[in-house]
Image (cartoon, rainbow, N blue to C red):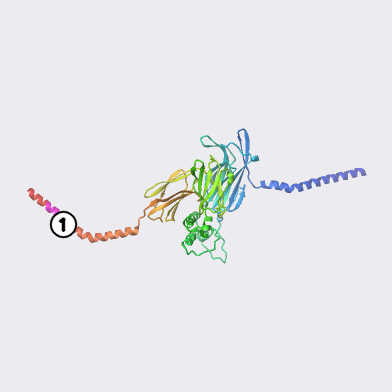
Amino acid sequence: MSELLQTLVQTGRLQYWNQVNRTGLFLAFLPFLVFWVQPNFGTAQETIQFNANGKLYRANIVWIVKHNGVTYRQQTAHALDRTGADNFDLAVHFAFENDTVPEDPNLVWGFQFEQGGNLITPARNEKISRSVDLFQRFHLSGTGDAYLTISPKIWRRTPSDQYQVVTQATPVIIGFTVTAPTLSVTAAEPARTRQDSTRRRTQPISTLPSVQPNTDEERAYAEAVRLADTQERIKALIDFVDTYAEANPRSGLVAEAIKNIPLGTSLPKRQNENAISYIIDNAVNPRVDSSSGWRTNLSPEGFGRFRLTLDDLGDTVHYIRIADPGKNAPYNRPRELSPFEQIKVELAGEDIDSFRIKTMGGTPPFIIFLSQNKVHKIRYILNQTDTTWAFSKASCTSCKTGKHTLEVYNSDFSTLLLRVEGAIHIRKINYYNAGAFAVLGLLLLSFAYKPLVRAWRRYRYNKTLREIEAWEEKG
């Protein structure tokens, strides 16, 4: 009996220690388990797979939203504050399993996007590349709710240089709540109007000491940064740099202004059979991403201007990424150049009432400016492409009689699509002069009225007399 009891006690102890050991092992591996599982909590995941030349390819789709220096990875809901920045960037990464990228050069991939709501531009487009990283910048306007529908796709390029969809992943819906909170007013600070608060928030942060605008340069800079409208402010700063940089390139105001405008690039221009070139404007410290596969050369062309030359690889897919870390955010972020993208903007003609702009390709909206003597007069917005659109000259109430310079930019001012000096002729009636001439005419008429009446009567009398004489001669 005692042996049986001893056996039962030992058996119970063994079971107890087995349970303790299992619990200890679980607790020991718990941190590793949490580390492995945690990245998958609260995020979405999409996968796309397809066959090519008898081989199965599979890629995980990773998307990242960057706004005002904050990165959101794989999230489907975002709260964006326009006080910090009016733009956000979307990066989509195709993570091919085992880094096995299809070798077929006719296979490309990317995504198609379309917005819901009316707060995001561009509203719809598609990005196609053989790069595993694709980027798109969006501009925010207004406040409220909006969303983007992202559809990852695989395309195959046909012999006629068209793209046919091979397969696509389940569309992803990314939501945005856009806000622009006002500044709080403390008891020690006098209350400001809403317009004053908006102007204060939208001014670029300057590292320069405050200066009294005594010179023309200081007054022009102060007027530019005081503009509340983002597009108007950027254009004013571009004009400021164009006006004062050549005469005084060491100016601190010019150096500050150039940091707060986008890196400007011309449209690609073929130099010869083997090279394509861009002119880079308003640059501080431009850098070209060499991982894109293009052979590039960046050479200075003067203050704030560089020439970027690309060896023509016969490539109609790859993008070129260029950034300027010397600029202030958000203008220091990378942007993509598409040497193969066909964009054409031209002045289609004008008449006394309007002028016409013709666009082919590109992503609207396009921003159109008229200026006279380097002074901006009016801004037009063209929300369509592949069209010819007429713009009324009468709507430019600040325009004066004479020739006006025409400039057309893309939506974020990163590309000057067209510039024609003295292209638009506007004639305005000078009502002061017209009134003066009218008064003068009435005065002259009043003084000449009686002499004219007497002359008319004399003419009628002489005519009647000649008719009587002629009648008498016949009788």
Q: Closest to the observer: 453 or 60?
A: 60
What is the magenta range?
460-466
Label 1: few (<14), some (14–19) or many (≥20) C-alpha neighbours in 10 Å: few
* Residue 340 shows in the view: no
Figure label count:
1
Residue 208 is at least partly visible in this image: yes
| Residue at image mark 1 | 458
Three-letter amino acid code at the position of disc 1:
Arg
Q: Residue at x 63, y 34 (%)?
A: 55
Residue found at x 26% / y 61%? 443
- Secondary structure of the residue carrying tag 1 is helix
Magenta span main SS: helix
Q: For this rendering, which residue is in front, 64 or 174?
A: 64
Q: Tell me residue 390's x, y (percent).
A: 41, 47
Q: Residue 83 in the image: state x and y as whole percent.
A: 55, 56
Can you say which quadrant of the picture contains the N terminus?
Answer: top right
Is residue 358 magenta-colored? no
Q: Residue furthest left?
A: 475
Residue 393 coordinates in the image, percent (x, y):
40, 51
Determine the residue located farthest toward the top in the rendered image: 54
Rendering coords of residue 468 (x, y %): 10, 52
Give 274 or 471, whichever is nearer the viewer. Answer: 274
